[in-house]
Amino acid sequence: MKEERISVFDIFKIGIGPSSSHTLGPWRAAQQFLNFLELKAGLKSVLTVKVLLYGSLAKTGKGHGTDIAVILGLSGYDPVTIDTTDIDRILSEIAGNETIFLQGDMRIAFAPKTDVVFQMKESLPFHPNGLTFIADCGSYGIQEQTYFSIGGGFVIQENEAEKSADTCVKLPYPIDYASDLLKWHRLSGMPVWQIVLENEKIWREENVIRKDLMNIWHIMRESIFHGCQTDGVLPGGLNVKRRAAGLNTKLLNGETCFNYDEWLKLIKTGGSGFKYTLDWVSCFALAVNEENASYSRVVTAPTNGAAGVIPAVIQYHIAFCNGSDDDVFRFLLTAGEIGSIFKKGATISAAMGGCQAEIGVSSAMAAAGLTEVLGGSVEQCLMAAEIAMEHHLGMTCDPVGGLVQIPCIERNTMGAIKAITACQLALQSNPENAKVSLDNVVTTMWQTALDMNHRYKETSEGGLAINIPISLSEC
């Protein structure tokens, strides 16, 4: 393992669904390519642009909106700020006129059907999620760059070292393994969240860290609330009906609300029984990933396909355990570090490791975060993360129709419930008696990923993807 210095804000990114590796990553790659062209030849020199998608980006790119992402990225839009209600109009104009405005300014001929090429039978050796941009820059010649979307919205350029937030920065408490966390805790007496906070202060002032993390939470909770109010059918051709809104209405006995605070009050006063709580946790997770599947704004946690697990568990804590904003702050810092450990020691890319790398990692992150805010020790936080991942090992990624809908949306409910269960088990256990450490399970997850057949790594060539008799009516 090479050293990486990853910020919690690298793990939690604001973006557009449905996939961090297939949507957000390629979008960022397109932006990087524009920056490269500007420095190399200037955008005014560009005559044509072609995009080649390889491996998993080709095989499930249509369902994951990879072509949409690169087009919007080349057009100068940003996933954090774009008005998602404008996406259909923008794409329709580009397709109808067969022109694109690079960086929103330089107009060139561009036909989406022929200038975004899905190389279905080719994969690049470094990573399954590869894409190449080729630009004819006239007198400056052909300019070409290849990028890899390696999971969670992280992007690296071919032949370059993996980029993360200030990889050469010296942190006061460098962490690559769970054992590092334990070492720093035993030396300093600080809990996980505080150790992570001290590291984050290298990049941002504490008040900025708190503000930015609360903004992350506000995006998460908005995706829960909006998803719980939005009915209809998900796009993509599978005709999957959204369920969160119907479940929300049923659980609230038909009562309506117009903002998050009113809605939260109704949930809290509606009951506290096991079945009621379980239904709500499922509803929270469904809501986020139905939003994700609808090209709405969500937070990678650590990926878009697993974006519902952490919000659902935080919302559970707020609604049923009287959680506070300070709890959210500590939860996200703790969870973010667990995600970082998995990224360094294994992967958070389903194209590399199957769904264990997405739902499994998000469940482990959520389990640790919840254990922290419920008063667990550092050892119990790490134990909770280990339990959650141990029972996701080997989970395949086999999206039906290449869409992040079946089985992905329901898997977020399972990941959230497993996280809560893992937390409770850890809180009622003595970690000194544990036989499996978090580092053990990270290593095992990576070995399992390497052994897994490529068909089960986000290709839609195995598992449910080939055994469900559903034909796409659109795509």
Image: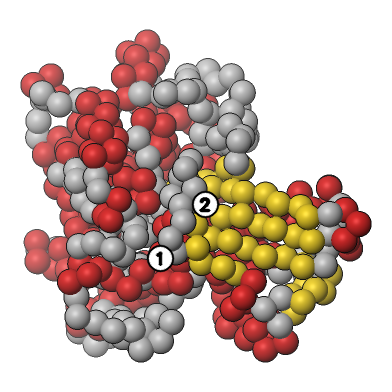
Q: Residue at x 28, y 84 (%)?
A: 471
Locate the N terminus and report the quarter of the image it occupies.
Answer: top left
Question: Colour scheme in the image?
Answer: secondary structure
Rendering quarter of residue 46: bottom right
The amino acid type found where label 2 is placed reads Gly
Q: In the image shown, does 17 or 381 lie closer to the viewer?
A: 17
Q: Which mark is residue 108?
A: none
The residue to which callout 2 is attached is 130
Asked if residue 86 lies left or right of residue 12, the reply is: right
**Farthest residue, direction top:** 187
Marks 1/2: CA–CA distance? 12 Å
Residue 24 visible in this rendered orientation of the protein: no
Q: Residue at x 72, y 65 (%)?
A: 49
Q: Residue at x 11, y 39 (%)?
A: 425
Q: Residue at x 43, y 82 (%)?
A: 475
Q: Position of residue 329 (x, y in %)?
A: 43, 43
Q: Position of residue 268 (x, y in %)?
A: 24, 66
Rendering quarter of residue 227: bottom left
Asked if residue 229 lies left or right of residue 247, the reply is: right
Q: In the image shown, does 424 or 364 lie closer to the viewer?
A: 364
Q: Position of residue 65 (x, y in %)?
A: 49, 70
Graded by Cα atoms within 10 Å as few (under 14), some (14 to 19) or many (20 or more), the crowding at tag 1 reads: many
The amino acid type found where label 1 is placed reads Thr
Q: In the image shown, does 256 or 234 lie closer to the viewer?
A: 234
The residue to which callout 1 is attached is 60
